[in-house]
């Protein structure tokens, strides 16, 4: 054992000696802050890739449920795509900006696919098929409570409808006014369809705006007010999609409990929604002068983009680790079944 350790130690020392000979400039003490940032970012990207490939290979090895595992693979590939996109955004080499714009658009379109696949995965867990009008009887009729500000919006809409119905009843039928509770609805096929539409509007709007942004940039027509208009539209779209996902989680928390729903939802909300709002906040802080280039260690033109890229790269390492638990291969490898039998 001792001789093996000596061999490993000597081999490592030789490798370090060769590396220092081949790359004499590779000295952390003499590196500038920009190079150190890129080196650290590259290490984080490699870690994200490592954890993702590890989980991906496990699912491919235990390929038992293609419908669910295809969705899982698409979802877990989101983290390395975000990390690589942000790393390219930090580079300052010829052609990197054009490639970053292209890769960023691919990432934004991929977001839409991830949201769609995530909802499909949840429907698969619950044995729900809206296209075939299949909704299990045990979940029909369940109450859904809307929270503020959606309840206020629905209150205004329902009040107008209620006044119209009341006027028609009083003048034509002579019945009393109906009572309605806009903040509470019953779970039916139509309710699930509405939640699906609230989610899918983001799936459509996100790539459409990304394509429009690229076209307008190429034509030199992507002005500041258009940029902020797109941001506002995306904020509304993201908020609606996130609200639908949160509502879906709360309604089916009991049925989804065996599938680690909270961790799965946190990964989706963290990667897609939190990163989006983080970028918006950084843009606002930069616009009002709170964040300035001389306050940051990178000498770049668009400081908010640099900060966003660094933060996203760090966050993707965390999310790639969380995904090991959230989208574990255990349900397909038989480990969960063996564990349950052992506990029994």
Image (cartoon, rainbow, N blue to C red):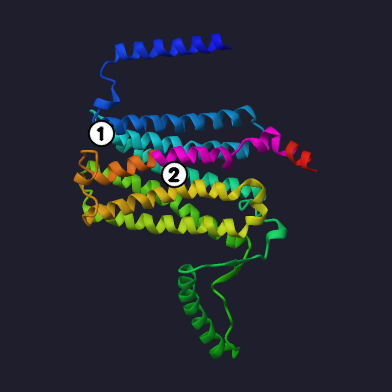
Tell me, yes or no, whether the two marked residues, 2 and 1, touch with CB atoms within 8 Å: no
Residue drawn at the location 45% of the way across and 10% of the way down: 11
Residue 214 seen anywhere in this rendered image of the structure: no
Question: In the figure, residue 84 lies in which quadrant?
Answer: top left
**Tag 2 secondary structure:** helix
Q: Earlier in the sequence, mark 2 or mark 1?
A: 1
Mark in front: 2 vs 1: 1
Label 2 – label 1 distance at C-alpha: 32 Å
Q: Nearer the viewer, residue 139 or 14?
A: 14
Q: Quadrant of the N terminus?
A: top right
Residue under label 2, please give it. Answer: 111
Main SS of the magenta segment?
helix
Label 2 crowd bin: few (<14), some (14–19), many (20+), radius 10 Å: many
Task: Give the x, y percent position of residue 76.
Answer: 51, 38
Residue drawn at the location 23% of the way across and 43% of the way down: 302
Residue 33 has which mark?
A: 1
Farthest-out residue, right: 344
Task: Give the x, y percent position of residue 13.
Answer: 41, 13
Give the residues drawn in magenta, as a range: 314-337
**Magenta segment: does it hold 329?**
yes
Question: In the figure, residue 232 lies in which quadrant?
Answer: bottom left
**Magenta segment: does it hold 158?**
no
Q: Is residue 323 left or right of residue 284?
A: right
């Amino acid at each position: 054992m001792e001789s093996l350790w000596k061999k490993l130690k000597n081999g490592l020392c030789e490798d370090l000696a060769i590396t220092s000979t081949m790359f004499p400039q590779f000295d952390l003490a003499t590196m500038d802050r920009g190079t150190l940032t890129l080196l650290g970012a590259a290490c984080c990207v490699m870690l994200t890739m490592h954890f993702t490939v590890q989980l991906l290979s496990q699912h491919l090895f235990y390929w038992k449920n293609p419908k669910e595992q295809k969705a899982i693979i698409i979802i877990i590939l989101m983290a390395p795509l975000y990390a690589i996109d942000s790393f390219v955004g930090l580079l300052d080499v010829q052609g990197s900006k054009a490639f970053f714009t292209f890769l960023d658009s691919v990432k934004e379109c991929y977001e839409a696919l991830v949201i769609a696949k995530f909802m499909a995965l949840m429907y698969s867990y619950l044995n729900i098929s809206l296209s075939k009008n299949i909704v299990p009887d045990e979940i029909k009729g369940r109450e859904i409570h809307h929270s503020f500000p959606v309840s206020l919006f629905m209150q205004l809409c329902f009040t107008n409808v209620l006044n119209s119905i009341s006027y028609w009843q009083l003048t034509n039928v002579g019945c009393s006014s109906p009572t309605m509770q806009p903040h509470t609805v019953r779970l039916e096929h139509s309710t699930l369809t509405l939640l699906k539409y609230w989610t899918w509007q983001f799936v459509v709007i996100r790539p459409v705006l990304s394509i429009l942004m690229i076209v307008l940039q190429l034509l030199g027509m992507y002005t500041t007010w258009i940029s902020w208009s797109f941001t506002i539209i995306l904020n509304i779209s993201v908020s609606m999609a996130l609200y639908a996902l949160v509502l879906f989680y709360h309604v089916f928390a009991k049925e989804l409990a065996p599938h680690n729903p909270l961790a799965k939802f946190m990964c989706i909300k963290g990667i897609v929604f939190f990163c989006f709002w983080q970028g918006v906040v950084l843009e606002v802080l930069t616009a009002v002068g709170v964040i300035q280039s001389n306050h940051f260690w990178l000498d770049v033109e668009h400081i908010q983009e640099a900060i966003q890229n660094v933060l996203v790269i760090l966050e993707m390492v965390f999310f790639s680790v969380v995904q090991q638990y959230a989208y574990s291969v255990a349900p397909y490898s038989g480990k969960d079944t063996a564990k349950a039998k052992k506990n029994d």
